[in-house]
Amino acid sequence: MSNDIAYPVFRTSDLGLGLSTARRLMEFGRREDSRVAVYAELCSVAEVQRVARELPQGHYAGNFDYREVDGVPREQWPPLVGGLAGPDLPTDPAVYEGRLPVTCELDDLPVGRIEDVFAAAIGPSRGWINWEWLCWPDAPELDFLGERKHAEVSLLCNTRTRELSEPADDHTVLLHVRSVCIDGRQVRKPYAHWLAEQVGLTVMGPGELW
């Protein structure tokens, strides 16, 4: 089993610019069957209800304790535990007590299907857009073979970490390659630099395992 490591290659306070830059990098590796996924954490009832109106096709699920569902048939789980589409979300704020943050997720979509709508809807909430099933080319001058499994591009929205653990006033584009660590050194980092340079970008800092 292998992992991605994602390097920051662009950061901006303009989400539209971040999205267009991420797309430029994604197009460099895009295949016919490339896909996109989006994810957000919504930390207030008002944000859940607003985003659900703008992304009714999203899958919304609330925080829960696994003891609530252990041994309980899925059809008997509380509504926000099993996950709901936007139009089916409860309107009573009391239902959300203990359930925040509520996540919104859509995955395995064709490229171009959801990115603009998601970027318009996310507002101040933290989340990400992730393009996958890409293909990075060989870099023969560096003696690096290309890759498919770990060729991805991400756009972090209002945060700088995959875990969405800290808010930020900016948005970060990440370039993914295979993580190969030898003696504490990521030996494919030069390949990430090379890939970024092909579309006029630069690796800005250390990578994060994805």
Image (cartoon, rainbow, N blue to C red):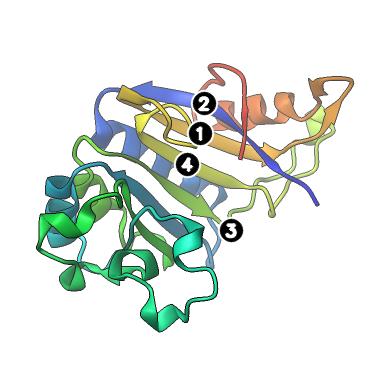
Residue 149 percent location from the top left of the image? 69, 54
Disc number for residue 174: 1
Q: Which mark is residue 8?
A: 2
In this picture, is 124 found above or below 36?
above
- How far apart in space, not on screen, are marks 4 and 3 (Cα)? 12 Å
Image position, residue 189 (x, y; %): 71, 25
Q: Tell me if 187 is positioned left or right of 91 in this view.
A: right
- Is there CB contact under 8 Å for labels 4 and 2? no
Front-most of 4 and 204? 4
Of pointers 3 and 2, the one earlier in the residue sequence: 2
User: Can you give x and y, in whole percent of width and height, for residue 191 in the image?
Assistant: 71, 30
61 and 38: which is toward the camera: 61
Label 3 secondary element:
loop
Say if mark 4 contacts mark 1, CB within 8 Å. yes
Classify mark 3: residues with Cα within 10 Å, few (<14), some (14-19) or many (20+): many
Amino acid residing under circle 2: Pro
**Which disc is residue 133 wearing?**
3
Around disc 4, counting alpha carbons within 10 Å, would you say few (fewer than 14), some (14 to 19), or many (20 or more)? many
Residue nearest the observer in this picture, 48 or 146: 48
Quarter of the figure with residue 11: top left
Asked whether the beta carbons under mark 1 and mark 2 sit within 8 Å of each other, the answer is yes
Q: Residue at x 21, y 61 (%)?
A: 55
Q: Label 4 belongs to which residue?
A: 154
